[in-house]
Amino acid sequence: MSDLYKGLYKYKRQSLYKIARTAGEDRKNLAYDYSDTIFKKTMSNHMFRNQTLTDFMGFMNDIWVKMVDSIKSYKISKTYSVDKDYKYIN
């Protein structure tokens, strides 16, 4: 990537505390991880030929993933038996 995008992906960093909290867990039967393919599977491949548009779609993909995850966090807030940062819910 060029210097144009330098520092734009800081929002994707994971907290070291969250990583340490789940270290060593062996989770099975997890749901499909749609976080990388939510836009690639719904948009035409013709749109991804342009590199600038592909980069823009990458940012839009992150926005859609955050929207879906916010719905999941609402579901978690109604369940009192799990931690508020629990991310393994469908």
Image (spheres, rainbow, N blue to C red):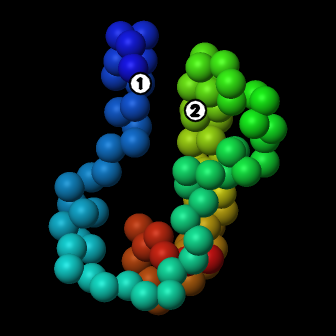
Residue 41 visible in image = yes
Residue sitting nearer the eye, 35 or 85: 35
Residue 16 placement (x, y as % from top left): 20, 55
Q: Say the numbered circle drawn on residue 86.
A: none
Asked if residue 89 is positioned above or below residue 50 in the image, the reply reads below
Q: Residue at x 56, y 54 (%)?
A: 35
- What x and y, as percent, mark residue 53? 66, 21
Q: Which mark is residue 59?
A: 2
- Residue at image point 57% right, 25% down: 55
| Residue labelled with disc 1 | 8
For the residues bearing labels 1 and 2, Cβ distance under 8 angstroms: yes
Asked if one can make out residue 84 in the rendered structure from this viewpoint, the answer is no
* Amino acid at the residue labelled 2: Phe
Q: In this view, does 10 lie above or below 83?
A: above
- Residue drawn at the location 66% of the way across and 62% of the way down: 71
Quarter of the picture holding the C terminus: bottom right
1 or 2: tag closer to the N-terminus: 1
Quadrant where the N terminus is found in the figure? top left
Label 2: element kind: helix
Left or right: where 2 falls relative to 48: left
Give the Cα distance between marks 1 and 2. Answer: 10 Å
Q: What amino acid is at disc 1?
A: Leu
Residue at the image position 69 percent from the left and 29 percent from the top: 48
